[in-house]
Image (cartoon, rainbow, N blue to C red):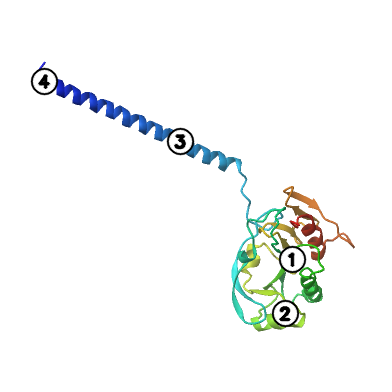
Amino acid sequence: MHENGFGKIGENMNSMLHDQDASARSDAGIIVMSMFFAGILIVAFTTSPIASGTEIGERAPIFTAKATNGNGWESFAFEDLLDLSWTWNSTEESPWVAVEFLDIDCGYCKSSATEVGEWAQMYNAEQWPGPDVVFIAIAVGFLGDHTRAELLEFRTQYNNNFLYVDDLDVSIAKDWDVGATPTYFLVQPDGIVAWNSQATNGLGWDAKEEKSVPLNGFDDGYVQLNEAIEQLTMLNGGE
């Protein structure tokens, strides 16, 4: 055969081998990618995401709003209070969050305001053996139109030396499914709702077991905010 003929055959063979090699690499790549996406699907279908909401065991809705500590109104992000890496056995001293929804025209909000102020100081004091609890009040306008000046006056009158959040348009209350005041929540450092006075008063969330547990009302069976704090933070305080 002519020399050029052998050369042509050689070129064709090299081309075929190259194509086969490229095809093999492509097939291997497809297999790897298929295994990768299959792994993602397995994780997605076997991992239960934490729902956003205000039932116990759900992740509390985050929000931003104007808030005051008594000296002007500034931007506040609820998420800034949270430590998303917290677990029931954390050694970090991350605070829990007590959230009160109040209306300054609400009679029971007025009658309990002084006591709530005392709790806010008690659960941050050195003699309290559990983790610190940060209190915030979310002031809504269910019963009438209010001004920020009136909120400040109420806060001062009842010695509520903790953050007041402006929710006079009740947008946060709607996200938290709050329809009456006062309503209280206890939120774990990682943002999980541990107790809801409105929906599941007699139950709390056990972070270690990841299930609800019954709480004891010390007097009449109805669980108060301070009772929920003392039972749940000591149960899962990360001490």
Residue 147 location in percent, x, y?
65, 81
Mark 2–mark 3 distance (CA, rounded to whole Å): 60 Å
**Which residue is denoted by mark 1 in the rendering?**
132
Mark 4–mark 1 distance (CA, rounded to whole Å): 90 Å
Three-letter code for the amino acid on which mark 4 is drawn: Glu
Front of the two marks 1 and 2: 1
Mark 1–mark 2 distance (CA, rounded to whole Å): 21 Å
Residue 198: image quadrant is bottom right
Judged from the image, the secondary structure of the residue bearing numbered disc 2 is helix
Judged from the image, the secondary structure of the residue bearing numbered disc 1 is loop
The disc, 3 or 1, on the residue closer to the chain's N-terminal end is: 3
Three-letter code for the amino acid on which mark 1 is drawn: Asp
Residue 226 location in percent, x, y?
81, 65
Instruction: Assign the N terminus to one quadrant of the image.
Output: top left
* Residue closest to the eye, 220 or 192: 192
**Which residue is denoted by mark 4 in the rendering?**
3
Mark 4–mark 3 distance (CA, rounded to whole Å): 47 Å
Does residue 147 appear anywhere in the picture?
no
Judged from the image, the secondary structure of the residue bearing numbered disc 3 is helix
Three-letter code for the amino acid on which mark 2 is drawn: Arg
Crowding at label 2, few (<14), some or many (≥20) Cα neighbours within 10 Å?
many
Does residue 156 appear anywhere in the picture?
yes
Instruction: Classify 29 as above or below 162.
Output: above
**Which residue is denoted by mark 3 in the rendering?**
34
The disc, 2 or 4, on the residue closer to the chain's N-terminal end is: 4
Crowding at label 3, few (<14), some or many (≥20) Cα neighbours within 10 Å?
few
Residue 78 location in percent, x, y?
62, 66
Q: Residue at x 73, y 62 (%)?
A: 186
Residue 89 location in percent, x, y?
72, 53
